[in-house]
């Protein structure tokens, strides 16, 4: 979509929150578990939070790499406003260092302002309304690192009846997590693997904080949450790991939490791996259903069976999809199956 405003100029970066002052003048960022300690002029691992003369600033605030209207299914969310469009945007930088990053051109970019556009929260919501989108997604790169900007847009969106979607790795500190998600309506959390070894070596982060975020979201209950697991051949696609991951979601979050198994394609620093075979996704979906998850999907491949929302009681396809397109939505009143009246978990009212 076209830019909302003139290209970003060299205006002063807005003051950020989520930090503490340490002896000696350093600032410790409290947004993600990295806890970057920044001296004057230093930026964090994410590249968008910097100590400028003793003040934490957000180089990403009010800036985006562009806007797009996507199907909500692309986030992916299958139980939140299915069949609707969502206004999507992101910035640059990331608090993780995934070697297989599918959005590396923005997540690994520095916050120079080149190629970015400026906008206000009011302009973003105006664009969503004008585009006929009932929701706005903070996505493409991880919005945790530009939390102040996402919160301000979400605050304006809530005031005007537009809902918000947070697409994230879930790598966020407790205090920031509570404030961020208090303004969000839905989230998709990327659970990249179920081993600390994978997180440490492949993403340069840790598994435990992500699991804490997922448990907190399930316990809190205000934000509709779905989970994505990108299956990388030979790294995190072992059937036993899939079984443990799905079993953890069922026991710690609940059997109605949708789980999406997504296909990897070679990207950035991991071009030596093949694409994920469709059969791997089909197997993972079968395993997750065997351990008791009621809504399991496949993504990044064409698989109408694996993309349909099935009634957990009678198996009727209440929502039929082809890729990200909804072909048929047969949800009855109060989000029930038209065949057996079983309620389907989700947030379906536009």
Image: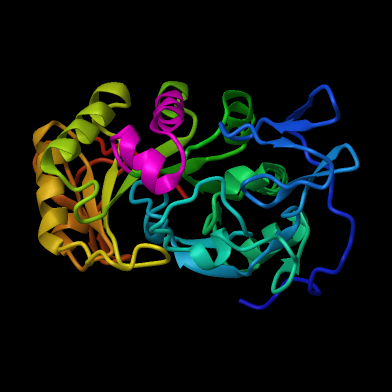
Is residue 250 or residue 345 the one in the foreground? 250
Residue 62 x %, y %:
75, 57
- Name the spot of residue 8 as percent of width and height, x first: 80, 68
In the rendered image, the vertical position of residue 246 relative to residue 122, given as above or below: above
| Residue 290: % across, % down | 8, 36
| 212 sits left or right of 92 in the view | left
SS majority, magenta? helix
User: Split into 4 quadrants, where in the image is the N terminus?
Assistant: bottom right
- Relative image position of residue 225 (x, y in whole percent): 41, 38
In the rendered view, does 188 fall on the left or right side of 21? left
Above or below 304: residue 214: above
What residue is at 14 percent from the left and 63 percent from the top? Answer: 278
Foreground residue, 109 or 290? 109
Residue 204 part of the magenta-drawn span:
yes
Q: Is residue 230 visible?
A: yes
Indicate the colouring scheme. rainbow
Which is nearer the eye, 275 or 153? 275
Residue 47 higher or lower than 198, as above or below = below
Q: Residue at x 46, y 43 (%)?
A: 204
Is residue 191 in sight in this rendering? Answer: no
Q: In this image, 164 relative to 262: left or right?
A: right
Q: How many marks?
A: 0
Hey, which quadrant is residue 115 in on the image?
bottom right
Q: Which residue, as the protein is rendered here, is positioned at the far bottom?
A: 2
Task: Please give the range of residues in magenta.
Answer: 193-216
Whether residue 194 appears in magenta in the rendering, the answer is yes
Q: Residue at x 35, y 44 (%)?
A: 192
Residue at image location 74% in from the left, 65% down from the top: 112
């Amino acid at each position: 979509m076209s830019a909302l405003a003139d290209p970003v100029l060299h205006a002063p970066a807005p003051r950020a929150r989520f930090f503490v002052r340490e002896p000696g003048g350093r600032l410790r960022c409290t947004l993600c578990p990295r806890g970057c300690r920044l001296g004057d002029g230093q930026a964090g691992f994410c590249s968008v939070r910097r100590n400028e003369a003793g003040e934490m600033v957000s180089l990403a605030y009010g800036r985006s790499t562009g806007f797009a209207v996507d199907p909500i299914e692309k986030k992916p969310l299958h139980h939140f406003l299915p069949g609707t469009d969502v206004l999507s945007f992101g910035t640059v930088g990331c608090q993780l260092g995934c070697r297989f990053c599918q959005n590396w051109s923005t997540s690994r970019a520095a916050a120079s302002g080149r190629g970015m556009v400026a906008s206000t929260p009011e302009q973003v919501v105006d664009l969503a309304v004008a585009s006929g989108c009932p929701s706005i997604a903070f996505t493409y790169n991880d919005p945790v690192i530009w939390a102040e900007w996402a919160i301000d847009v979400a605050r304006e969106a809530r005031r005007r009846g537009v809902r918000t979607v947070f697409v994230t790795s879930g790598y966020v500190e407790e205090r920031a997590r509570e404030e961020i998600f208090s303004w969000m309506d839905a989230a998709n959390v990327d659970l990249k693997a179920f081993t600390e070894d994978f997180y440490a070596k492949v993403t340069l982060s840790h598994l435990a904080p992500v699991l804490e975020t997922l448990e907190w979201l399930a316990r809190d209950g205000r934000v509709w949450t779905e989970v994505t697991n990108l299956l990388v051949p030979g790294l995190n696609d072992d059937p036993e790991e899939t079984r443990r991951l799905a079993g953890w979601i069922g026991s710690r979050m609940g059997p109605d939490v949708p789980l999406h198994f997504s296909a990897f394609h070679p990207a950035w620093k991991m071009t030596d791996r093949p694409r994920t075979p469709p059969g791997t996704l089909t197997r993972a979906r079968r395993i997750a259903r065997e351990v008791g998850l009621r809504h399991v999907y496949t993504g990044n491949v064409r698989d109408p069976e694996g993309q349909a929302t099935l009634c957990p009681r009678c198996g009727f396809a209440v929502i039929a999809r082809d890729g990200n397109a909804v072909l048929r939505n047969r949800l009855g009143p109060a989000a029930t199956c038209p065949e057996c009246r079983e309620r389907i978990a989700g947030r379906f009212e536009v």
